[in-house]
Amino acid sequence: MSTPPPASNLPQEKGHHELRAHLAELYWRVITRPIPPDQVLSFYFRHSKDLAQKARGFLAAALYDLLRERMRLHALLEDRHLHHLSIKDQMEKNQSIADPRLQRRAPYVPWNGCIPLPRLRAEEETIAALSFWLWRQYGAFISEQKSLFAILIDHWRNLPILQDETRRFPNPHLIEPLLFASIPGSLKEPLQTVFGSGLTADVARRWQSRFGTEEFELLIREFNRPAPLDLRINTHKMTREQALELFAKNDIKAEATPLSPDGLRLQQKMNVFKLEAFEEGCFEVQDAGSQLVGFACNAKPTWKVLDACSGAGGKSLHLSALMKNRGEIYAHDQEDERLQSQKKRLRRSNCQNVRLVEPGTAAEHAPYDLVLVDAPCLGFGTLRRNPDFLWRSPLEVRLSEIAALQNLCLDQYAPLVKPGGIFVYVTCSFEPEETIDLLNQHPLIQKDFTPDPLLPHFQYHGIKVGGLAPGANHLTLLPHQHQTDGFFIARYRRKG
């Protein structure tokens, strides 16, 4: 039986009620505002200086766990809001709260450990929480959850174990084995075999149809796990072998990443930004799949390169290392604030061939030997890190908006490639409408560019990617197949 996620293991020592309240506040902020969870956490921690480092780590892990489980929770509770995580909202509306401790107005309010559903008795609230734990362990498709919930309510309602102090259910993992043992044999098998996606219904249907049931289950199982912590070694400063030795001397367990020859994967969670090696620019945090983009570009040290949507600059930094600080890299983005954030990273990493250009001025420096477009996308490949991407707005609406932005990127940046030059298009998503279908339907790409196979460029760097055909110019990375984030990479050469 697997270990329950952090959100079901809230600390029970002194102060745990305050931690529950902090978690409730963080969750409420994320689901009610169009702000990424990492930014919410950063702002919240900056203004909660009394929180110890250990508590901050716990709250961050628990928040992401709740976000991963949000769709399952909402299906389980018949699409009602989680009232124990919407206390602030209830107080603002002057709704009654059963627990008298929650009546007072205060910045942080404790939670009594129950899921206070309307029309459910106290013992049924506990049963709802227990049922939620069961789905976290064995899963169920959204369409199956309501019927299973009703069966479990009937079965557990009169269990003696629910008549004692566990009714308040502050520490569910203590009684989980007893509860599982009480489930009739006829229920155990279906509960163990059904697989819970935790996805919105539209995404679940789409992926199951596209990948098939078996592949779909493997993919979702991987997406429901926390992402590993991958580092890219800055070869301006040291080799991967030297980095492994350095981490070993400091009792930090690390191993080489799959695929990327510049990557390390830490085998423990830690704040790497506090390490001296990070301050000295020896590594950057970057998923192994994202690292493959630099190798797919295979830029020569004499080239003039445009990183058109450079964002915080991770790929520009890698290209600089691969080009050995030679040539020219123009880092461009439509948001000047993101561009400016690169300055500190560039200094720390000793990148001397990267030049920041103002938004909208990339064409002034054309033509380029290589144009890299890391296009805006749904971001579904990063669901392990950004589970909120699933439910920000309806999928079809987002796909239409994203496709329009991606077409605009192709219109603006593909013409800047010189004849015979290279165009690389990447997304941290893998929906056909924003990847291969988009490229196959774009008139400029089809008219002026020819597919350029990826395999020779990966082989040049000693990279072996399973399933990549010799003539294929595009690659889709999936977490259950490649042990990376989901990613799409395509390479083209301009005619002439």
Image (cartoon, rainbow, N blue to C red):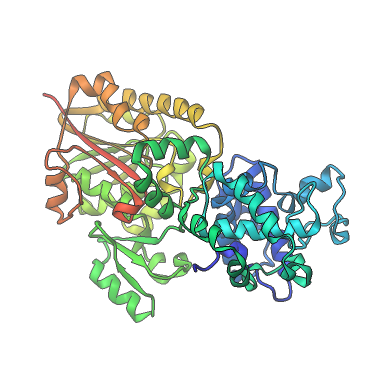
Residue 330 location, x and y as percent?
30, 39
Please name the residue shown 14% across and 56% down the image: 462
Q: Is residue 30 visible?
A: no
Q: Quadrant of residue 247?
A: bottom left
Relative to 38, 109 lies left or right: right
Please name the residue shown 38% across and 40% down the image: 429
Q: How many numbered tags mark residues here?
A: 0
Relative to 463, 287 lies left or right: right
Residue 124 location, x and y as percent?
75, 56
Relative to 7, 235 lies left or right: left
Please name the residue shown 27% across and 46% down the image: 293
Q: Nearer the viewer, residue 226 or 184?
A: 184
Q: Is residue 142 visible?
A: yes
Q: Quadrant of residue 489?
A: top left
Q: Nearer the viewer, residue 221 or 247?
A: 221
Image quadrant occupied by the C terminus: top left
Q: Quadrant of residue 242?
A: bottom left
Residue 312, compared with residue 260, is above or below; it is above
Q: Nearer the viewer, residue 145 or 298?
A: 145
Residue 376, compared with residue 102, is above or below; it is above
Residue 67 location, x and y as percent?
57, 51
Residue 264 location, x and y as percent?
31, 64
